[in-house]
Amino acid sequence: MNSLLSRALELQHAAHELMYLGMDGEPIYSDTFCRLNKELLVKSDSLFSSQSSNIEEEANLCLALLMGYNATIYDYGDKGRKKQAVLDRIYNILEKLPASLLKVRLLTYTYGEVYEESMLQEVHNIMDNWNKSALTTEQTEAMEELKNIEENPYPFEVI
């Protein structure tokens, strides 16, 4: 099956793999690193013009694109413009998206780009309603991702 959703989830998985490459203690080989970066950019670019009328599928697609473009080191000169276009799409769907793990992940990655406090507050509000004694693996990972972004903000300049 090569549906839009399955391709978006595949891109999310590949981006996550690249972002955490070497964190398991295994060595990182330059040829593998370069190959994964190239594959990720190609996958991201191939999905960039895709859109969905289904709100959750569109959210997964936007999350995948944002993760993909953030994870890769390559840029053909248009990555910043593409990331901004994805962020614009995200702003259009966030209010329509119900409080869920997907919304938490989308807000987390978007917050990592724009550092809007209202997004951070919304993420924490959703997480505060989770049953802390019965967290899923995905919820725990989402909490760790948010913690990492909060503790290690990407350096940016205010002009």
Image: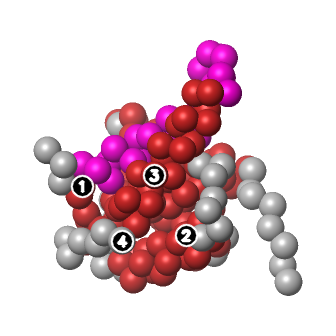
Number of disc labels = 4
Q: Earlier in the sequence, mark 1 or mark 2?
A: 1
* Mark 1 in CB contact with mark 4 (< 8 angstroms): no
Q: Which mark's residue is nearer the viewer, 1 or 4?
A: 4
Secondary element type, mark 3? helix
Along the horizontal axis of the image, is 123 left or right of 22?
left
The secondary structure type at the circle numbered 4 is loop
Residue count near mark 1 (Cα–Cα under 10 Å), binned few <14, some 14–19, many ≥20: some
Which numbered dot is residue 49? 4
Range drawn in magenta: 6-30
- How far apart marks 3 and 2 lie (CA) works out to 15 Å
Residue tagged by mark 3? 42
Q: Which mark is residue 5?
A: 1
> Upstream in the sequence, badge 2 or badge 4?
4
Query: In which quadrant is the C terminus drawn?
Result: bottom right
Q: Is the Cβ of the residue at disc 1 closer than 8 Å to that at disc 3?
A: no
Determine which of the numbered discs, if any, sits on residue 83 in the image: 2
Please determine whether, in this image, residue 33 is positioned above or below residue 54: above
Tell me the element at label 2: helix
First in sequence, mark 3 or 2: give its number: 3
Q: Are marks 3 and 2 in contact (CB under 8 Å)?
A: no
Q: Position of residue 81 (x, y in %)?
A: 58, 76
Observer-side mark, 3 or 2, equals: 3
